[in-house]
Amino acid sequence: MANSMKDLVADARTRVSTVSPADAMSAAGEGALILDVREPAELESNGRVAGALNVPRGILETRADESMPTAEASLVAQKSGGTVHVLCASGGRAALAADTLRGMGYEATIIEGGIQGWISAGLPVEG
């Protein structure tokens, strides 16, 4: 039987922990990375987290693999001891992305509630 997106997200959530938006923001101040996996148009319409790295979910693996010429240095740098806190619109893509990153050797968590959780927590967004 084929899995739906909902099934894939639920499965990923069994392997990846969550972090509150406030804790993710605090950790970013101590060297962790906030990775926003939303599409560029979403950043424009819903705002962006200052200092977050944007890598859309569809190209994450090409940016997280240090052997690829397209590797993103600030992301790859986290692999050797940092944490990546993943953000999307509501948490589904973040769960899939964080699970993928964990499979690639990263320490990754999901930011609870996505960008809406971030805004609801009263944390700043740009744009």
Image (spheres, rainbow, N blue to C red):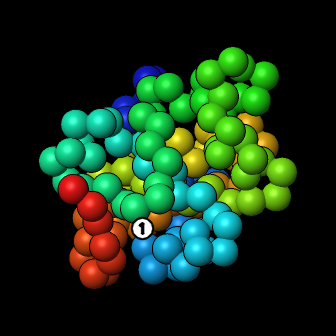
Residue 116 image-quadrant placement: bottom left
Name the spot of residue 127 as percent of width and height, x first: 21, 56
Name the spot of residue 14 as percent of width and height, x first: 58, 56
Instruction: Please tell me which residue lies in front, 58 or 100.
Output: 58
Amino acid type, residue under disc 1 in the picture: Glu
Q: Residues within 10 Å of mark 1 (few under 14, many from 20)?
A: many
Q: Residue at x 54, y 32 (%)?
A: 60
Q: Residue at x 55, y 79 (%)?
A: 26
Q: Is residue 9 visible?
A: no
Q: Is residue 106 left or right of residue 121?
A: right
Q: Which residue is mark 1?
A: 112
- Judged from the image, the secondary structure of the residue bearing numbered disc 1 is loop
- 123 over 74 or under it: above or below: below
Q: Is residue 4 left or right of residue 107?
A: left
Instruction: Please tell me which residue lies in front, 27 or 105.
Output: 27
**Location of the N terminus (image quadrant):** top left
Q: Is residue 33 left or right of residue 106?
A: left
Q: Residue at x 44, y 43 (%)?
A: 54
Name the spot of residue 62 as percent of width and height, x first: 61, 24
Name the spot of residue 19 as percent of width and height, x first: 53, 71
- 25 over 91 or under it: above or below: below
Q: Residue at x 68, y 60 (%)?
A: 83
Q: Is residue 42 left or right of residue 78?
A: left
